[in-house]
Amino acid sequence: MNIGITVYPTYGGSGIVGSELGRELALRGHNVHFISSMLPTRLTELNERVRFHEVEMMSYPLFEHQPYDLALATKMATVARSEKLDLLHVHYAIPHSISAILARESIKQKRYVPVITTLHGTDITLVGADRSYLPITRYGLQQSDGVTAVSRFLKQATIETFDFDEIEVIPNFICSCHYKRLPDSPLRDELAPSGEILLVHVSNFRAVKRPLDCVEIMAKVKAKGGHARLIMVGDGPERSACYYRAEQLNVKDDVVFVGKQANIADYLGIADVFLLPSELESFGLAALEAEACEVPVIATRIGGIPEVVTDGETGFLSDVGDTEKMSDDVMKFLNDEEMRRTFGEKARESAVSRYGTELIIPQYLKFYEQVLGAKSAASV
């Protein structure tokens, strides 16, 4: 198949999943064309089966803001015709599904290219649910040839918000070869020079991820006698607030900000405990990546996280904002190496057996074939 994929190229779950889906599809012999404003975060290698088509926006005095959605639709239509795409698979509903539908309609007299929309979370729970965007988001869902969601939670949220239930749940996935324990990595010696237990948080540092809670947890762990360091991976609007809070709580020497990293697996592979105190997660991809690296997860009991993290087996779940309990859970792992190891082993077993690429990628391919089959039947 010739597949067009559009993602937000920034640091976030939808971009990560879309990029790695394209890579996995290419490994299985399909041709993948990424259509985006710039190279997606996790797309590190282009070849004859993985190509990138940059969306270029017009600079014109009349436009106060460059019309990205129209430029994207134009590029999608151009690539669909020139590369003879079989389908367009867009990640994140707004504006990607609308742009794809516009592209499909603009060329349908010569070539009908089905549109598949994958919902990732905030495109439905925050952006799409906003009253000003709700009608156009519902239209994008209804006009897509196929819709998938990354968790049962997100499917239910979409049904309740948009009264739309033609949704296939295909969860996020993990490559077991890429995400694994790295016991002899020199990075661990660098980050834990005194043998500290490493707590790791990975996010785009938006308020919804509650990265400040990670600093609060670290301070409470230190107050309880825990010998640990907190490694904050990523960047975003809350980073400076986290740094300031670490100074206030006198833990700035115990918190290391490493910024955006191309290979998150390097940090998860040496972690001892993963922190995910978000107030909203439709799936919790970072938690899944940590579990695949044999890292137990301490997270909030919200959204799709309970589908990924089994409380009391692969990690511990708490209410949003309950940093006291979360710090107590961290101390359990700090004080019991055997527990930490057992939870980690169960975490990897769960991640690989339930969310491995060899299980999930075929689900996407089957869905593609269903959508293409429906298009063929309709054209007869």
Image (cartoon, helix red, strand yellow):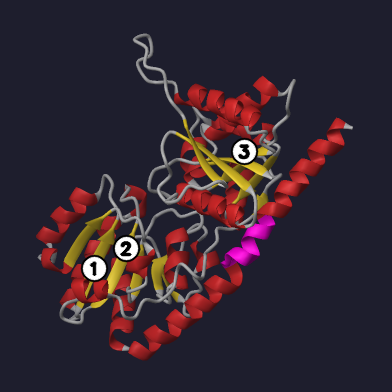
Residue 87: % across, % down: 67, 38
Q: Main secondary structure of the magenta part?
A: helix
Task: Please identify the quadrant where the C terminus is shown.
Answer: top right
Q: Which residue is mark 2?
A: 201
Residue at the spot of label 3: 162
Determine which quarter of the picture holds residue 165: top right
Camera-nearest label, 2 or 3 = 2
Local crowd size for mark 3, using a 10 Å CA cut-off: few (<14), some (14–19), many (≥20): some
Please state the horizontal and vertical placement of residue 90, each as a whole percent of the image.
57, 40
Check disc 1 and give the amino acid type.
Leu
Q: Magenta includes 356?
A: yes
| Magenta span contains residue 162 | no
Describe residue 1's horizontal placement relative to residue 217 as left or right. right
Look at the image and tell me in which quarter the N terminus lies.
top right
Q: Between 123 and 134, which is closer to the camera in this rendering?
A: 123
- On the image, which quarter does residue 209 sit in? bottom left
Label 3: element kind: helix
Q: Secondary structure at mark 1?
A: strand
Q: Which span is picked out in magenta?
A: 355-363
Disc 3 marks which amino acid? Phe
User: In the rendered image of this protein, does residue 67 appear above or below residue 289?
Assistant: above
Label 1 packing within 10 angstroms: few (<14), some (14-19), many (20+)? many
Q: For mark 1, what is the residue?
A: 230
Query: Mark 1 and 2 residues: CB-CB less than 8 Å, in contact?
Result: yes
Instruction: Indicate whether 32 appears above or below 272.
Output: above
The front one of 235 and 181 is 181
Q: Amino acid at mark 2?
A: His
Residue 207, image x, y percentages: 32, 48
